[in-house]
Amino acid sequence: MPDTTNQVVTSDSKTTSGEINNLINNHLELIEKTKGEIQVLKDQIEEALSGDANYQDAQKEMEIVKETKATARQKAESNPTIEAIASELKEKKGALKDYKDAVSAELFEYYKATGSSEITTSDGRTYTFSFSVKLT
């Protein structure tokens, strides 16, 4: 398998769709292989830690502290003032997500219309934006 880790495909290259497809498939295979290797290494660390008595004692102590903290937090959060603040916080976070989603869609439309990935706001600040693609 050829090493394609440093190849970049740009829109003005003369790469065919078949070649791009091969590059994508090669990288997808590398992603899956690397994920497996990472999992093996994580498992080795966990196995080594499970045999360490000091680590196991610290883990047990940490669980007790976590339970105590969770109980105290639940009790504190039942306070009506904190409940009201938490509710408002949840609403604000939802609104912020909606605003960000709207700006993302609008920036995409702006890019399609202008071909520019830079925008200047009404207060004179200039922002550069980019797009990313994720496999799901």
Image (cartoon, grey):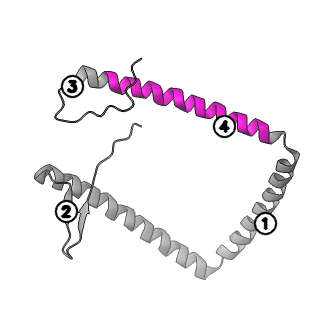
Q: Mark 2 belongs to which amino acid? A: Ile
For the N terminus, which image quadrant? Answer: top left
Which label sits on residue 68?
Answer: 1
Q: Earlier in the sequence, mark 2 or mark 3?
A: 3
The reply, left or right, for residue 99 in relation to residue 85 is left
Q: Mark 3 or mark 4, which is nearer to you?
A: 3
Query: x, y (%) of residue 54?
Result: 86, 50
The residue singled out by tag 4 in the image is 42
Q: Real-space Cα distance between discs 4 and 1? A: 29 Å
Residues at circles 3 and 1 in contact by the CB criterion of under 8 Å? no
Q: Real-space Cα distance between discs 2 and 4? A: 43 Å
**Is residue 122 placed above or below 112 in the rendered structure?**
below
The residue singled out by tag 2 in the image is 119
- Could you tell me which secondary element the residue under label 1 belongs to? helix
The reply, left or right, for residue 126 in relation to residue 92 is left
Which range is magenta?
Answer: 22-49
Q: Earlier in the sequence, mark 3 or mark 4?
A: 3
Residue at left offset 38%, top offset 23%: 25
